[in-house]
Amino acid sequence: MVKRERWRQDFSGWFSDMLQEADIMDTRYPVKGLYVWRPYGMKLRNLVFSILRQLHESSGHHEVLFPLLIPETLFQKEAEHIRGFGGQVYWVTHGGNQKLNIRLALRPTSETSMYPMFALWIRTHADLPIKVYQVVNVFRYETKMTKPMIRLREVTTFKEAHTAHATKDEAESQVKEAIKIYQKFYDELGVPYIVSKRPPWDTFAGAVYSIAFDTITPDGKALQIGTIHNLGQNFAKVYGLRYEGVDGKHHLVYQTCYGISERAVAAAIMAHGDDDGLCLPPQVAPVQVVIIPIPFKERETPVEKVAGEVKEELTAAGIRAHLDNRDLRPGNKFYYWERRGVPLRIEIGPKDVEREQITAVRRDTGEKLTIARKSLKTQLVQVLEQITNHLRERAKKSFQGFVNSTTDLKSAKELLKKRGGIVRIPWCGQESCGKQIAEKTEGEMLGEEIDSAPTQTAKCPICSRQATVNALLAKTY
Ligand code: ZN
């Protein structure tokens, strides 16, 4: 019943069409890499990010809002950081007709605007830790092919968290907390992921090490959907982030930062869709239940009235219900809401009214259910939960089908070529071997998998020394 052929085989086309047809984004804005969020998409985006906000707030992060513009003098201070972003920065060079003395960067990320302010805020150990976040737009002059929500010149929705700590251990714990937050977030969205420590040559500019979350697109490519960086004291040195300790001496702080962009919305769309359109997890669906009255002209029944009552009842129960009473044929309405991924459709016809029941149709399975009016609320809550679980399981299964393990380079290369996805292979952890593994398999090294270890007898396929980690290889988006 559920068809996922186009979703799998022409994922890129499917995704672009769905953004347009489901009223998520308009991709016709006349600047490359910039797109317009439409009302339904905006609602979806806000629901997705409200989960992330909640997770940050409940773990002691505070929301802030820093300026979009960063003076070149501040931006240039961290030499390695600037090397990492240098070629991708948009510069404001004029104010009106006047050339600016100091150019202003449109933030590509906010370390260089935040940390000089942190330096003013931090005096003693009592001022630590600092844990803040903001949800803002960032700009990068992307030279590769741009793609809505995935590769952008204006990332419209970037949740960036920044922390400062007194000790190295605390920063290390913060990285672990960030991993937990991101795990919870993607678990709630039912988006499967794999977590790895990026290899040294792919570490965030200015970081000691970087952790990344990757998911897999329906056509088998890895897509990075979140990063966490341990910055050590690199930025603290440059921007003078010092605190007076209990010992009366001044010490540099340790820092972390971590970010998730609107790729999270893309990930939720791609993980659960099918050939008929989106299939949204109830928790983030702008409309969780759509009610469609099916009147018969020949018979006088209070279908519309009952539909209105059902809507009131569900809204009062905290369910996002919408009554579609437009003058359209029911079939057209079905199609319309299917495309938009509404988890549950309720149909109310004359027979349903007579029997004091409703007919519900699940978007994820197409299954039809008859539910008595008197137990409607409790039953719908249960069905929505079943949908959530089913979507999560289905996405997980599809993801697992894409993750393969091997011990030799030849089969790794073949797996990547034929099936895509992610290939797990033992690695000694040395940079030169890692680079060769990637080269010889024609894949990209995502990094070493977190929470997994090679068997005791596993050998690095390059140097034959004992493997210490599992490397993850993939073709990336
Ligand atoms: Zn090796």
Image: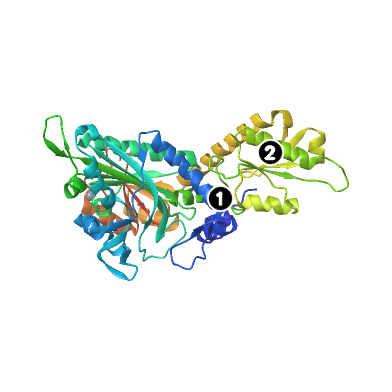
Count residues near mark 2 (Cα–Cα under 10 Å), then give few for <14, some for 14-19, many for 20+. Answer: many
Give the distance between the C-alpha atoms of the residues marked 2 and 1, in whole angstroms: 26 Å
Q: Secondary structure at mark 2?
A: helix
Can residue 268 be spotted in the picture? yes
Whether residue 453 is situated above or below residue 441 in the rendered picture: above
Residue 311: mark in rendering: 2
Count residues near mark 1 (Cα–Cα under 10 Å), then give few for <14, some for 14-19, many for 20+. Answer: many
Image mark count: 2
The answer to which of 452 and 54 lies nearer the viewer is 54
Q: Secondary structure at mark 1?
A: loop
In the image, what residue type sits under mark 1?
A: Gly
Mark 2 vs mark 1: in front: 2
Whether residue 93 is situated above or below residue 357 in the rendered picture: below
| Farthest bottom residue in view | 97
In which quadrant of the rendered view does residue 55 lie?
top left
Q: Position of residue 154 (x, y in %)?
A: 41, 59
Q: Residue at x 64, y 50 (%)?
A: 338
Dividing the image into 4 quarters, which one contains the C terminus?
A: bottom left
Q: Position of residue 222 (x, y in %)?
A: 41, 52
Q: Residue at x 39, y 38 (%)?
A: 56
Label located before the other in sequence (2 or 1) = 1
In the image, what residue type sits under mark 2?
A: Lys
Label 1 sits on residue: 273
